[in-house]
Amino acid sequence: HDNITLQGKHDLQRMLDMFKYDADFEENEKQYDEIRKEILGDDDDDDEDDDEDDDEDDDDEDDDDDQDEKEVKQELDANGNIKIVDMTEGDLINLRRKIYLAIMSALTFEEMVHKLLKFCHLPGLEGELCNMLIECCSQERTYIKTYGEVGQRFCMLQDVFIEKFDESFAHQYSTIHRYETGKLRNIAKFFAHILHNDAFDWNVMKYVFLNEIDTTSSSRIFIKILFQELSELMGLQKLKSRCEDPLYAEAFENVFPTDNPKNTRFAINFFTSIGLGGLTEGLREHLKNLPKRIMLQQQQIESDSDSDDSSDSDDDSSSSSSDDDSSDDDSSDSDSSSDDSSSDDSSSDDDSDSSSSDSSSGSDSDDSD
């Protein structure tokens, strides 16, 4: 070979950098293998065995690829397009990052709402937006009112956010034991702000079960902060009227339980200890009248049992009277039959007497003759 210098002109062979389809690929490969064997020899049997194993693996992979291609083709024929699913959730992570940056960069809650609504161009992203808003709120050192105002505005703009915040409340309450006290406090104040403004339905209180068994220390702290914040925002009397509203009776049925005296006493002691004993006046009245109700129920049960016994005795007496009547009828029938027999006997006696008189008269006439 000639010496290569920097100043000389050389054939760069740029076409080698470009891919070209080789129609005779297999034949060229065989020629390459023959040349390689001539140069290197064919003494490496192990290498050949490895090559055979690799060829078999390649064949298996080719078969799998063929099957996958067939499945893709069937999906193409059925749907007309291929739906690519990202199992790494890369899109979701990018969406959360954008939502976080939009929240942190906004100066006012109106600007925050305007930026966040741009991420709802696809259906199903509203739930992720609500969860990210609650998560960002919980990460703050203290509660920031801006998050509550954003949640309120979302609920007023679109009804779908009401459903998503309802689901978020149920999820957050069921997993509240995972949060620290600071995060728990921010979440409780966030939902208290939305409830105070009637942005979404108060029926979310149906997820709260206030008793000794169904609550933990974290859930009790959450309920405490939630009702204390509502009391500060609404006032105790307005909150009490809302809790006693017949429209939400089913929602507050588990918050103010009346099914078991033990649960009732627990709720009374809980609200009294957090300074909201005024909300438990109905429970105190219920617990006070509970013995009287129990006595009335027992008396009613006893009266019902007595009435059942009296009805049974009346039935027995009526059946006995009917039996007596039937016996009287039988006796009267027997008496009438006896009377008939006696009358028959008397008639027969009369007949015999008349016949005897006739015979005596006949004998007398014979004697006179």
Image: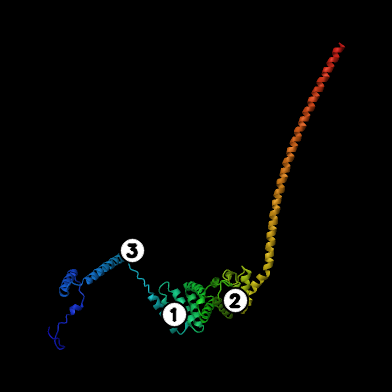
Instruction: Pinpoint residue 58: horizontal percent, then vertical percent.
Output: 26, 69
Q: Is residue 279 above or below residue 304?
A: below
Q: Residue furthest bottom?
A: 7
Task: Select label 2 or label 3 by which is in front.
Answer: 3
Q: What residue is shown with label 2?
A: 239
Count numbered badges in the picture: 3
User: Disc 2 residue type?
Assistant: Leu
User: Disc 1 residue type?
Assistant: His
Q: Is residue 58 above or below residue 98?
A: above
Task: Select label 2 or label 1 by which is in front.
Answer: 2
Whole-number angstrom distance, CA of label 2 to CA of label 3: 58 Å
Q: Quadrant of the N terminus?
A: bottom left
Instruction: Pinpoint residue 356: horizontal percent, then vertical percent.
Output: 82, 20
Tag 3 or tag 1, which sits nearer the N-term?
3
Label 2: few (<14), some (14–19) or many (≥20) C-alpha neighbours in 10 Å: some
**The residue tagged with tag 2: helix, strand or loop?**
helix
Rendered image: mark on residue 147: none
Q: What residue is shown with label 3?
A: 78
Instruction: Pinpoint residue 180: horizontal percent, then vertical percent.
Output: 51, 80
Instruction: Identify the image's colour scheme: rainbow, by chain, secondary structure or one colour.
Output: rainbow
**The residue tagged with tag 1: helix, strand or loop?**
helix
Q: Quadrant of the C terminus?
A: top right
Task: Select label 1 or label 3 by which is in front.
Answer: 3
User: Disc 3 residue type?
Assistant: Ala
Q: What residue is shown with label 1?
A: 114
**The residue tagged with tag 3: helix, strand or loop?**
helix
